[in-house]
Image: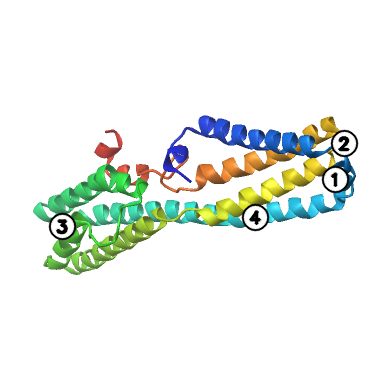
Amino acid sequence: MSDWLHNLPVIWMALVVFGATYLLAVLVQTIVGMLATGERVRAFKAVSPGMLPPLGIIFGLFVAFTAAQVWSDNDHASAAVNREASALKSALVLAAVFPGEPEAHLRSLIQRHIEETANKEWPMMVRHVATLSISPAPLTEALQQTLALSPNNPGQQIAQREIAMSLENALEARRQRILVSRSHVNLTKWACLFLQAACALLAIAVVHSDNRLASAISMGAFATGVAASVLLILAHDEPFIGQVSVGPQPLLQVMPGLAGG
């Protein structure tokens, strides 16, 4: 799916999806109505209505199969961002054990990492160009600084170890966040979903070819279900794109001054 569609507000996305689905339903009904003449009428009526439930069930399975991936991707994206934010917050809290220049430097590096993530890395994830080939310099420097500290007492030794673990957790969460940002429903899955929906609409139109009103009602109801299913999947397809996407707010809240900016 094109990113311009994912970037639409949900209301406009709904108008596009429902409009396209209803247009397809009208097109199918019109074509079947034009063909339902002469000998073809008897051929259409010979089509068993019993094929409609299996077609609907198969479409439902396609929707469930596709939605499962979408929900999983969104859960992983949200979990990765929250985990990164939690790890950075823990590092900031523990940094107070090293007052003075070490604490100030660590806070500065974490703030720089958050700013670069929100202002540079997030747009790159939206465009699917963020990669793991480049390590976040501020976070890497923060980890190196932490490991270079010289603890003066057992408490600082424990804090140093915990800060290092928190920064490593933040780096791992970032890696997961970038990997999930490249995940989406591929064209093959979308094509199969649309093809199955079109087959079901065609079958409904053929079965009710002798009654235009019954055909319009049945196809309208099924088309509405198709559009709602597609809209639900489409709105959540790209974890970091769109009105209901995962944003950098949890990271910005780590530094109160950034959250208000």
Report how far apart the C-alphas of labels 4 and 2 lie in the structure: 30 Å
**What residue is shown with label 2?**
210
Q: Secondary structure at mark 2?
A: loop
Residue 222, percent from left and from top: 73, 40
Characterize the local packing of mark 2: few (<14), some (14-19) or many (20 or more) Cα atoms within 10 angstroms.
some
Q: Earlier in the sequence, mark 4 or mark 3?
A: 4
Q: Earlier in the sequence, mark 4 or mark 1?
A: 1
Q: Earlier in the sequence, mark 2 or mark 1?
A: 1
**What residue is shown with label 4?**
62
Report how far apart the C-alphas of labels 4 and 1 lie in the structure: 27 Å
In this orientation, does residue 121 appear?
A: yes
Q: Which mark is residue 98?
A: 3
Report how far apart the C-alphas of labels 4 and 3 lie in the structure: 55 Å
Report how far apart the C-alphas of labels 3 and 1 lie in the structure: 81 Å
Q: Residue at x 10, y 52 (%)?
A: 100
Tell me if 135 is positioned left or right of 35 in this view.
Answer: left
Asked if the residue at tag 3 contacts the one at tag 4, i.e. Cβ–Cβ closer than 8 Å, the answer is no
Q: Secondary structure at mark 1?
A: helix
Report how far apart the C-alphas of labels 2 and 3 lie in the structure: 82 Å
Q: Residue at x 47, y 53 (%)?
A: 184
In this orientation, does residue 254 appear?
A: no
Find the residue positioned furthest to the left: 101
Residue 182, percent from left and from top: 40, 55
Q: Earlier in the sequence, mark 4 or mark 2?
A: 4
**What residue is shown with label 1?**
44
Q: Earlier in the sequence, mark 3 or mark 1?
A: 1
